[in-house]
Amino acid sequence: MISKQDYERAAARACEMLRQAGIAITPEERLHVEVADFGLDELERSGLQLLTYLNTARCCAKELVMTPGQTCPEHRHPPVGASPGKEETFRCRWGSVYVYVPGEPAATPACRPPAGSEAHYTVWHEIRLRPGEQYTLRPDTKHWFQAGSEGAIVSEFSTRSTDENDIFTDPRIVRQPRVE
Amino acid sequence: MISKQDYERAAARACEMLRQAGIAITPEERLHVEVADFGLDELERSGLQLLTYLNTARCCAKELVMTPGQTCPEHRHPPVGASPGKEETFRCRWGSVYVYVPGEPAATPACRPPAGSEAHYTVWHEIRLRPGEQYTLRPDTKHWFQAGSEGAIVSEFSTRSTDENDIFTDPRIVRQPRVE
């Protein structure tokens, strides 16, 4: 559960980070920044701020705004009906982000999972993205990501987003924010 | 036909506009900026510079870079096989762009088609996009667009892009650039 005040503070901070990075958004969009704490009640460690530009039946584009060291917990986008699952590309616009996926584990990973949640982080192949760099994730692939020390702004280009179908490794996670 | 020198000059200018707008691209991407003169040999009037970030079977993202007053000629993305045609969203990042689509014609349009090509511009409903503003186009909808007086940088989010299927109103147009 996140308080309305904390939610609004996090959304305002995300808008300020977008402004500093030179990414223009409309006054209307400022009101629709989403703050996801994944039900873990530790937004600074486990969380994400999102601005969804569009999400049609066929494609989706968002900006993800992350505070320094903030982690989006491990999850995957499974097949749904006729769809093989959401395909997504992360493109770093500002700051840096470390994306973890299946594959050869990093010998000395740059990131640690949020304390107390270690058991729910299982993939350790590390991809560092700096501004202008991007990575495309196949559907149904486990992944998690953490912002570097400055935070990160990451454009996500994808097929339709249906958050309710996402499968998180951590069974405590609730994707839809519950605001007090 | 565009000379190699003009092509490279236009690509370099596009990279410089991206830099000024704070949009990071990799050294590798600098080498893959596409310059489209549509075979009309008047790039300053009819043309477009593009950087394609990704174009998978399912989705596509690009930056379109336009010099002041430059026009992307009228075209549509028709159904191809099982696809209803490309769906695209234009999001203005920098400068301004006027998009023309079917519908109530503008009483006093902000733009004029390139001189000599007027007959090939048939839709006149005007949408002005400034930074942070966007417009989603349904598949198979005629459209053309022109940058404002400063030029424009426009993010395009879409389903798969297959330029070879685009249908231009102007029969003289050749979409694939021919470089001398």
Image (tube, coloured by chain):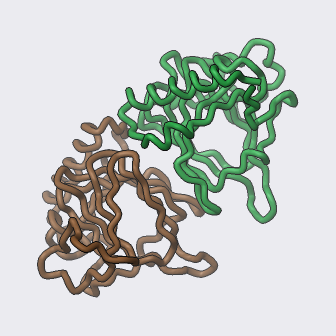
Chain colours: A green, B brown
Q: Visible in this render: residue B154? A: yes
Q: Quadrant of the C terminus of chain B?
A: bottom left
Q: Quadrant of residue A27?
A: top left
The residue closer to the viewer here, B104 or B175, is B104
Where on the picture, by quarter, is residue A106? top right
Decide if residue A61 is on the left or right side of residue A94. right
x 19%, y 76%: residue: B40
* Residue A75 occupies quadrant: top right
Q: Is residue B125 above or below residue A115?
A: below
Residue A112 is situated, as x and y percent measured from the top left of the image, at 68, 16
> Could you say which is closer to the camera, residue B97 or residue B42?
B97
Residue sitting farthest toward the right: A171
Whether A35 is drawn above or below A9: the answer is below
Residue B8 in the image, given as x and y percentages of width and height: 19, 54
* Residue at 80% from the left image edge and 13% from the top image edge: A116
Instruction: Where is residue A115? Give x, y as percent.
Output: 75, 12
- Observer-nearest residue: B86 or A100? B86
Q: Is residue A107 visible?
A: no
Where does the N terminus of chain B fall, quadrant-wise? bottom left
